[in-house]
Image: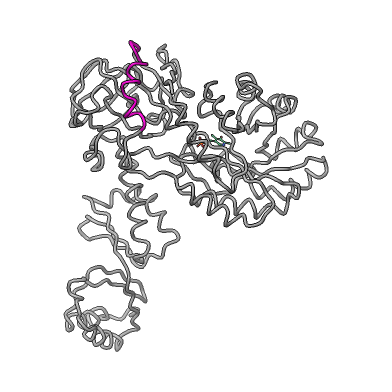
Amino acid sequence: MWRQAGFLADAFAVFKEHNYSVDLISTSESTVTITLDPESAVDADGSRFIRFIDDLSGLCQVEVKTDCVSISMVGNAIRTILGKLSSALDLFQDRHVHLVTQSANDLNLTLVVDSEHADSLVRKLHQTLISSQADNRAEFGPSWSEMNRTAGTARGSPEWWHARAPDLLEILGQRECAYVYDLNIIRKAAQRLNALRTVHRVLYSVKANDHPRILQVMAQEGLGFECVSIAEVEHVLETVPGGQPAEILFTPNFAPREEYEKAFQAGVRVTVDNSWVLREWHGLFTHKELFLRLDLESGHGHHRKVITSGKESKFGISLEHLGELSDHLQKHDIRVTGLHAHTGSGVTDVSVWQEQLRRLLAVLPRFPAVKVLNLGGGLGVPDRPEQSRLDLAELDKLLHASLGEAEIQLWLEPGRYLVANSGVLLARVTQLKDKGNYHYVGIATGMNSLIRPALYGSYHDIVNLSRLDSPSTVPCRIVGPICESGDVLGESRLLPPTCEGDVLLIANTGAYGRVMASHYNRRIPAEELFLAS
Ligand SMILES: *Cc1c(COP(=O)(O)O)cnc(C)c1O
């Protein structure tokens, strides 16, 4: 067809003759790809189609692809959002895209892919283009599942705090706000992780919540501790009765030299995540045993800011540097007894840890003294009522499959998974306001107590604890008292008609809540209370 005037006219004459209507088309110098309108393609015994292909084959070479699906992104002036689409289109990197078209009226962009990939692609496109914005943009309103559920239920059953509502209101008393924890929820999470057959040790990542009572529960459940600063190490040694340095793994990043010295003096295990320090401060590490944190070049996580591996991340030793590093380690008698990787936070796809394990096993031959592979933390908990829980049984199965008979201990070091669900933030309603398109519900504390929504756009379920049984009918923007426009805890959330003095409950705030709080605006962050069990 190269410079052959009338080729398309001849080809399409065949379509016309056999009464096939063309849906999408793209052309190049040597190829024309089209999809057929499924309505016009109805053909009881297939004979009409065979005759059509025969006729077409007189003009060109014909290849028929079936089991394809066209996925369309539809919107007014779709061309203007091509830039925004780029992250969505990344998804097609390893998929075979048969055809891309942009409608002439600028209303849609369509991709044709194999049907087996369609569902996951649509889900990912939805996540990239809609869900990631919906939490922070009032135009999107509450989601369908939000509008059709009873407050405080998730995955069909009520959250634990539903049954404890009277206790929660009682413990809050006259306070304006407080974090309240149920330690039993933490115990159960720890027991679920301890039950994993393939995981030899579970360390609690202290930075998620360092309250002494929580650390004590972790110790009672037999967990070790993963600390990212020397202050966390000292805190664990001081607050956990009988706290042993051997139970602690120190995993700092760009920490001053002095912290490593103190860690060795204290007798805790040290993870090094930079080959520079091993070279420059080799006196510190000579004749020592340590773990190395590697960057396995695949980052995961619920937000860009919590992806902790890959080229863009400041964590870990790049695999490229392992060769020269091995020589250096030998020369200075530095023994690597463990390898560590932590790719990100809030990960719900369990195959991520299997992939990490595979990659760590691949570099294992370089480090004959290694006995431990630490797969990091990052185990996600569902934030939204409709999300499913992490499938731990599947995780166990995948890790077992990849580990095989290797004589290696697997460790995990989760933070969020152990504590997120155990905590709720309670705050009293201070003021109401109707302005612009919004109905504002103001509460007594905001980003000074819980910065995650402002920092990561993270979603926390919010209910009116004083009126749990009233239907949620009013779309609200729930805000705190901090002088920042970003002090929004929930956008387009449905609440029952709400009054001054009601208590709102913000769920899943046991992890990275109080520990990230500040005194910004000189407001005292919510204190921490514990339910009696
Ligand atoms: C923060 C952190 C963790 C825990 O992450 P979670 O998402 O809370 O499980 C584990 N390991 C390291 C090195 C960390 O920095």
| Quarter in which the N terminus is drawn | bottom left
In the image, taking residue 511 as reference, residue 55 lies left or right, namely left
Is residue 166 highlighted in magenta?
yes
Front residue of 251/464: it is 464
- Farthest-out residue, front: 533
Could you say which quadrant of the image residue 150 lies in? top left
Residue 363 location (% of width, % of height): 67, 52
Residue drawn at the location 39% of the way across and 40% of the way down: 382
Could you say which quadrant of the image residue 42 lies in? bottom left
Residue 394 location (% of width, % of height): 48, 52
| Quarter in which the C terminus is drawn | top left
Could you say which quadrant of the image residue 137 lies in? top left
Residue 227 location (% of width, % of height): 61, 29
Query: Tag count in the figure?
Result: 0
- Which quadrant of the frame does ligand 1 lie within? top right
Magenta span: chief secondary structure:
helix
Residue drawn at the location 65% of the way across and 33% of the way down: 249
Front residue of 487/351: it is 351
Is residue 359 highlighted in magenta?
no
**Where is 364 relative to 332, above or below?**
below
In the image, taking residue 21 as reference, residue 249 lies left or right, namely right
Tell me, what colour scheme is on the image? Answer: one colour
Q: Which residues are magenta?
A: 160-175
Front residue of 253/423: it is 423
Residue 171 location (% of width, % of height): 37, 16
